[in-house]
């Protein structure tokens, strides 16, 4: 593809063109791919690049790569930088477009929900994290769920593709540290966000709607089975280190002593049990599931959420959710209306 100026009604327009076969055999013609706008109104960097033969070719390559994202500003910015650092021109056509959709969500995050200041306070008072900001990374992860949902590993690889990204230097391990932080402070963060929004809108929770769904996991075992497997492996390795024979190890694993220790281990870790088999709404009865419960107010704004083990019936999630709403938002009068509970 290449760039060319065409004059229409005394106005010059910059076009991105490509050469295609003509109607007659052996001929070629130029096809307009994109009208880039009035040339005289484009940024000065673009006009200067067009006048430079080498920069013009690089600019055309950049527009071609960024055509789907329509990210002209990123190409212009790079052209400007190549004037000061010509050695970077070779990397020009490998640049990624910069996304900016998260900037529209930033006022909602900071002002309406007040999460920036809450997270900064919690980071300072309850963590030892000093070299990077939890708020910046958590905002990026939440915004990404709306803009371009993907795994946390992929999110880490895409973090530099955003305009204004103070999380750019955060390493992969810190993504999981941020998730641990959210898990530890989830109740406090939800409560703060809802109360901040109610203060902004001068509203109150009058009616709450509640429902459950479930999701499945690609694993052959539920969490209790995994705990049994891990504890058995751990015990076997410990006995091997003590130079016990295979027969002695097998005899211990079949003993009442091992069974009692295993029962104590399962009781100690019962709060970690979530992935269990239950009534899957997607008919995934071979895989373990978890139940996700969500409560919203009369405007549709989420006010609480919980995750329950997959083997817990939905009816048993109602009372804990009601108690949570009462505790968080001082709800007093409760009238529970339901269609069916299974």
Image (cartoon, rainbow, N blue to C red):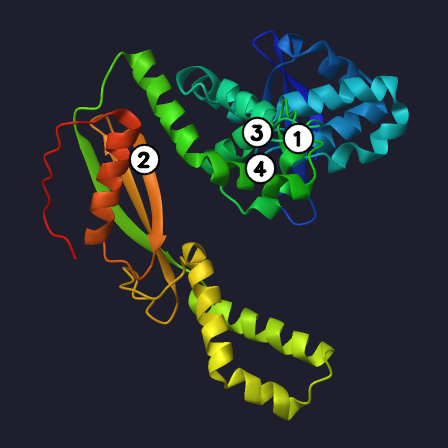
Q: Residue at x 26, y 48 (%)?
A: 212
Reading the image, the residue beneath label 1 is 129
Callout 4–callout 1 Cβ contact below 8 Å: no
Who's the residue at 27% across and 59% down the image? 281
Query: For mark 3, what is the residue?
Result: 126
Residue 224: image x %, image y %?
43, 67
Q: CA distance from mark 4 to mark 3?
A: 13 Å
Q: Which of the two discs, 1 and 3, sits closer to the camera?
A: 3
Residue drawn 61% across the image and 86% down it: 249
Instruction: Place residue 90 in its image quadrant.
Output: top right
Q: Earlier in the sequence, mark 4 or mark 1?
A: 1
User: Between marks 2 and 4, how big is the CA–CA gap?
Assistant: 20 Å
Q: Position of residue 263 (x, y in %)?
A: 44, 70
Disc 4 target residue: 178
Compare residues 126 and 225 and report the one nearer the observer.
Answer: 126
SS class of the residue under badge 3? helix
Is the C-beta separation of discs 4 and 3 under 8 Å? no
**Where residue 35 appears, x then y in whole percent?**
58, 24
Q: Residue furthest bottom?
A: 247
Q: How many dots with numbers? A: 4
Q: Quadrant of the C terminus?
A: bottom left
Disc 2 versus disc 3: distance between alpha carbons?
23 Å
């Amino acid at each position: 593809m290449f760039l060319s100026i065409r004059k229409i009604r005394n106005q010059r327009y910059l076009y991105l063109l490509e050469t295609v076969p003509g109607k007659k055999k052996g001929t070629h013609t130029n096809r307009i791919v994109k009208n880039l706008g009035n040339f005289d109104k484009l940024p000065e960097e673009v006009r200067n690049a067009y006048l430079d033969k080498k920069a013009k070719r690089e600019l055309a390559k950049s527009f071609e790569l960024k055509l789907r994202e329509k990210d002209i500003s990123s190409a212009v910015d790079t052209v400007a930088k190549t004037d000061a650092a010509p050695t970077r021109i070779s990397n020009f056509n490998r640049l990624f477009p910069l996304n900016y959709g998260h900037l529209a969500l930033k006022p909602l995050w900071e002002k309406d929900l007040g999460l920036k200041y809450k997270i900064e306070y919690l980071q300072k008072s309850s963590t030892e994290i000093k070299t990077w900001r939890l708020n910046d990374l958590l905002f990026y992860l939440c915004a990404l769920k709306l803009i371009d949902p993907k795994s946390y590993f992929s999110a880490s690889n895409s973090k530099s593709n955003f305009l204004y990204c103070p999380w750019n230097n955060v390493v992969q391990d810190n993504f999981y540290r941020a998730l641990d932080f959210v898990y530890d402070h989830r109740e406090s963060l939800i409560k703060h966000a809802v109360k901040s929004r109610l203060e902004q809108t001068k509203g109150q929770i009058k009616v709450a709607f509640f429902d459950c769904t479930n999701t499945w996991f690609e694993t052959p075992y539920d969490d209790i089975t995994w705990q049994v497997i891990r504890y058995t492996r751990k015990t076997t390795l410990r006995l091997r280190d003590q130079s016990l024979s295979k027969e002695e190890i097998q005899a211990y694993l079949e003993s009442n002593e091992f069974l009692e220790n295993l029962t104590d281990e399962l009781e100690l870790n019962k709060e970690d049990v979530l992935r269990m088999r239950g009534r899957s709404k997607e008919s995934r009865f071979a895989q373990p599931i978890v139940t996700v419960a969500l409560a919203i107010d009369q405007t549709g704004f989420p006010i609480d959420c919980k995750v329950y083990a997959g083997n817990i019936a939905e009816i048993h999630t109602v009372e804990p959710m009601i108690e949570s709403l009462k505790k968080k938002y001082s709800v007093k009068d409760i009238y529970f209306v339901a269609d069916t509970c299974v």
